[in-house]
Amino acid sequence: TGGLMRGKRGLIMGVANDHSIAWGIAKALAAEGAELAFTYQGEALGKRVKPLALSLGSDLVVPCDVEKLDTVDAAFDAVRDRFGGLDFLVHGIAYSDKNELKGRYADTTRDNFVRTMVISAFSFTEIAKRAAPLMAPGGSLVTLTFGGATRVTPNYNVMGVAKAALEASVRYLAADYGAVGLRVNAISAGPVRTLAGAGITDARFMYNYHRAHAPLRRPVTIEDVGGSALYLLSDLSRGVTGEVHFVDGGFNIVGMPRSENLRS
Ligand code: NAD
């Protein structure tokens, strides 16, 4: 363990369990000396998140459901009361009705479109707006996205449209908050086996396809994402903002898979 993040305080939003990508990021930050606070969605998940937080020396663990703005405000009040300020923030929150993470995008309902957009895209804007006043120049925010934002991925559907909005938000927020010295970036992770990932129909095909065709020929781990997030949340990346950084084993660069079975 090193001291890259010593003296820095951050809020981690989106840990559900020890498979969560946000958990991989939290571990990397804590190993470098960061002081962490966590939010959780609902008491059932709270029971899992509290012991995980404690294992990293954190007892600031507060509820937050981004569909209920009063809980978002309360979470930031709690962070301000305890930390006084904030140096970084991780947003690892997404949701869509799994009945619409299959079949055709064209069949997305209006209700689920709105809900998916609010939870998975607009929540980052609402959270940035609350985090920014707590941050001094040098502060850094990171959210999590997926390549399905720009390239059609079977069954990803409305979540791909929401991630496109999230990635555009990252650029607009980077422009807004760059004026006060804050940085806003996204990590585009390859498929990881998590609770949210399992909501996508045929998730196993996605993992296997990715592993077979990514240049690194192995699945992405939450520790891989943690390492890249550490860079984006630390001063090492002080000149970087508005970026979508791929942590996908290189999958995004591939134009044609190396499948053998189409040769005739
Ligand atoms: P996860 O299920 O561990 O985390 C998703 C989190 O979102 C959970 O903690 C859940 O409580 C939270 N959440 C959902 N609705 C919420 C709400 N209304 N209020 C507050 N929190 C809410 O799964 P994950 O894969 O670690 O997902 C984290 C982020 O990474 C998501 O944005 C996801 O889209 C993104 N991502 C995942 C993958 C993957 O393959 N798993 C790949 C790229 C990007």
Image (cartoon, helix red, strand yellow):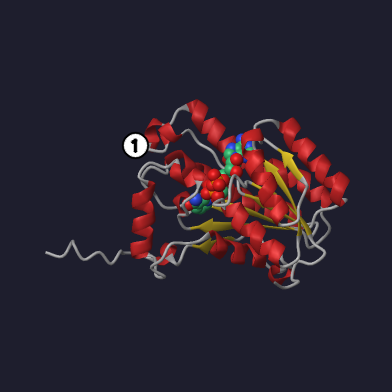
Residue depicted at 37% across the width and 62% down the height? 211
Residue depicted at 53% across the width and 57% down the height? 188
Q: Position of residue 207 (x, y in %)?
A: 39, 55
**Tag 1: residue type?**
Gly
Left or right, 133 with reference to 156: right
Q: Position of residue 118 (x, y in %)?
A: 60, 35
Q: Nearer the viewer, residue 51 or 172?
A: 51
Circle 1 packing at 10 Å, graded few (<14), some (14-19), many (20+), is some
Residue depicted at 31% across the width and 64% down the height? 256
Give the position of the N terminus as an image quadrant: bottom right
- How many labels, in total? 1
Residue furthest left in the image: 264
Q: Position of residue 63 (x, y in %)?
A: 71, 37
Q: Secondary structure at mark 1?
A: loop
Q: Is residue 213 above or below residue 105?
A: below
Q: Nearer the viewer, residue 25 or 245?
A: 25
Q: Nearer the viewer, residue 170 or 142?
A: 142
Left or right, 245 with reference to 8: left
**Residue 42 visible, this angle:** no
Left or right, 206 with reference to 9: left
Residue labelled with disc 1: 103
Q: Is residue 5 above or below residue 158?
A: below
**Residue 37 visible, this angle:** yes
Give the position of the C terminus as an image quadrant: bottom left
Image quarter for ligand 1: top right
Q: Is residue 194 above or below residue 182?
A: above
Q: Nearer the viewer, residue 202 or 112?
A: 202
